[in-house]
Image (tube, rainbow, N blue to C red):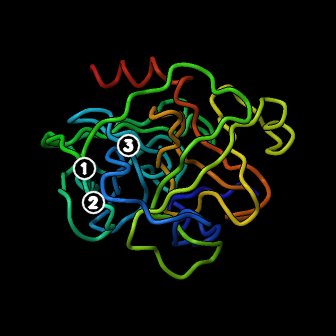
Amino acid sequence: MWIKLSIFAVLLVGAYALPGRIVGGADAGPGQFPYQISLRNRNSHTCGGSILNERWILTAAHCVVYDGVGIEHYPAEDFSIRAGSNNRIAGGVLRNVKRVIVNQEHKDFLNDLALLELTEPLEFSDKIDKIDLLEEEIPTGDELIISGWGLLKTNGDHLPILLQYNTVTALTTSQCKRKVLSWSDSLLCLSHPKGAGACNGDSGGPAAYKGKLAGVAGFVITGCGSSRPDGYAKVSNHLTWIRTNMAA
């Protein structure tokens, strides 16, 4: 079973309600992930996201659309972000969302991307900064860093206060197809040991490769921290869509 990772979407569709953190992760240090934001729906954390520039955030489409599916999104004024803090509920700065742009090809678990335009620009510092987009493919077996405030485990009972991170590994196309039972050029499969990986609340958050944004958290298979890989939207496959909509 593919399970989407946003707290909000999962509660609505009634799959698994999994509030928590990166499974098997560690506390992030101050300013370690200055591009990471907490996406808030009506002032409650629901997903992660990444800062692309002073006005734009990249997250998962299912974090902002009705029932976590399709392309019809909730009103922009329902959303805000917290940037510049590892603390999910305090510190940093808050910004409201002015506009939501959902990838028109979003369907099921694929092309799971949305852009958020902020009402006011962020001011960059040692704790708030953008992340560049990865343009090339990742060599098989290379490591990436994932981060977020998602659940510690499937059916966990609370979200962590502090940002968590962990290390995962890129799979080949054939490995991904075999283990996920589906394949698309828009999908990035990230492997991890059992008891590690992404979980609900991590949706929309970054997978970084050598300091660049390679993936956007989308789903887990059979539960958080299983032996199956996690599914991320592959950024390099969506460069035109991202840049075109940011410029519009």
Q: CA distance from mark 2 to mark 1?
A: 7 Å
Q: At which x and y percent is residue 16? A: 63, 70
Say the numbered circle drawn on residue 91. none
Q: At which x and y percent is residue 107? A: 60, 38
Which residue is located at x 27 percent, y 57 percent?
78
Q: Check if mark 3's residue and mark 1's residue have beta carbons within 8 Å.
A: no
- 139 above or below 196? above
Query: Does label 3 or label 1 sit earlier along the sequence?
Result: 3
Whether residue 4 is visible, yes or no, is yes
Q: Rate crowding at label 1 as few (under 14), some (14 to 19) or many (20 or more) other CA atoms within 10 Å.
A: some
Please identify the quarter of the rendering in which residue 93 is found: bottom left
Please identify the quarter of the rendering in which residue 222 is found: bottom right
Q: Amino acid at mark 1?
A: Lys
Q: CA distance from mark 3 to mark 1?
A: 13 Å
- 107 above or below 155? above
Please identify the quarter of the rendering in which residue 82 is found: bottom left
194 on left or right of 216? right
Q: Check if mark 3's residue and mark 2's residue have beta carbons within 8 Å.
A: no
Residue that numbered label 2 is attached to: 85
Residue that numbered label 3 is attached to: 50
Q: At which x and y percent is residue 143? A: 63, 40
Residue that numbered label 1 is attached to: 127
